[in-house]
Image (tube, rainbow, N blue to C red):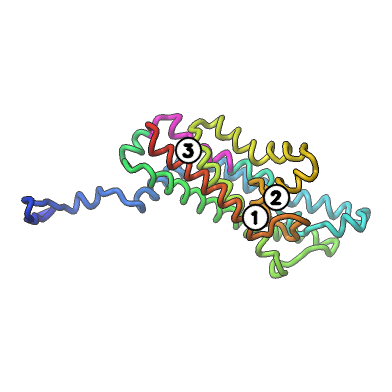
Amino acid sequence: MSTGTVATGTTGPRFTSRAADRGRVTFVRVLHAEWIKLRSLRSTFWVLVTAVFLVISLGLLVCVGTVSRWPDMSAGERARFSAPNASLTGLYLAQLAIGVLGVLVVSGEYATGSIRATMAAVPHRLPVLWAKTAVFGAVTFALMLGTCLVAFLSGQAVLAKEHIDVSLGDPGVPRVVVGVAVYLALTGVLAIGIGAIVRHAAGGIAIVFGLLLVLPEVVRALPSDWQDRITKYLPSEAGQALSRWHPGEGALSPGAGITVFVLYAAVTLAVAAVLLRKRDA
């Protein structure tokens, strides 16, 4: 049985074969390879389980604490209370878990040296970065969307004891639930870009923690007028604008905030792409 054909042109015989087609590098195959690698990492399971646990458990804890304190809370505290955000408080710790895993997705290959085999299989290099980003972003979003829905429903069931719960169909509530998942997925994308730039787990994780935790604290030490101008454009503050039920005075709108955060992630990936093409594996 023939496995190929021969075509004759001006430059002589040209051989094509089904075997060659099967071995051709396509973006779909690169995506599949990155999916296999993501599943194969032991850290993937444990970090994602940790993120799920944090989102659900911390949200429940905050809701239980709110219900116990509600009769003694002042009118101002009650006015500032956001039922959907209370049940999704776990995003503040889950973002760190997702950020750590995003860095490890890239830096792990450099640590083991397996990145050389990856780049040998995909010599154009950039499809590897895009595939890692797409796979990790999609997995994180899908998992966190389901987790946020469970956390929201669980938290509102607790808040119903004081009749301060809201429904998933209430205005702005779906945006909050989906917004948390979007923010966490984009945090993972940002972390992948940082990991590709730094190539070292410790350094990449330190930068992610610095951007999400340390930088906001540094800005809070600045004069108040500087704080008002800078804080809303910080990565975490801008990204979380989409997930806030009632944005604070002077804060970016949900659309503007997520746009700023997308730009942070896009610029990070662009720098990573340039360095990936220039540096040795």
Residue 199 on image: x %, y %? 48, 33
Q: Earlier in the sequence, mark 3 or mark 2?
A: 3
Asked if residue 233 is positioned above or below residue 41 in the image, the reply reads below
Residue 109 on image: x %, y %? 43, 34
Asked if residue 125 is positioned above or below residue 181 in the image, the reply reads above
**Which-is-in-front pick, marks 3 and 1?**
1
Q: Are marks 2 and 1 in contact (CB under 8 Å)?
A: yes
Task: Report the disc number at residue 257.
Answer: 1
**Residue 58 falls inside the magenta stretch:** no
What's under tag 2, amino acid-wise?
Lys
| Secondary structure mostly taken by the magenta-highlighted segment of the chain | helix
In the image, 116: left or right of 16? right
Task: Report the disc number at residue 79.
Answer: none
Instruction: Tell me the quarter of the picture where residue 119 sits.
Output: top left
Look at the image and tell me whether residue 91 can be seen.
Answer: no
Question: Considering the numbered disc 1 on the image, is that residue within a helix, a strand or a loop?
Answer: helix
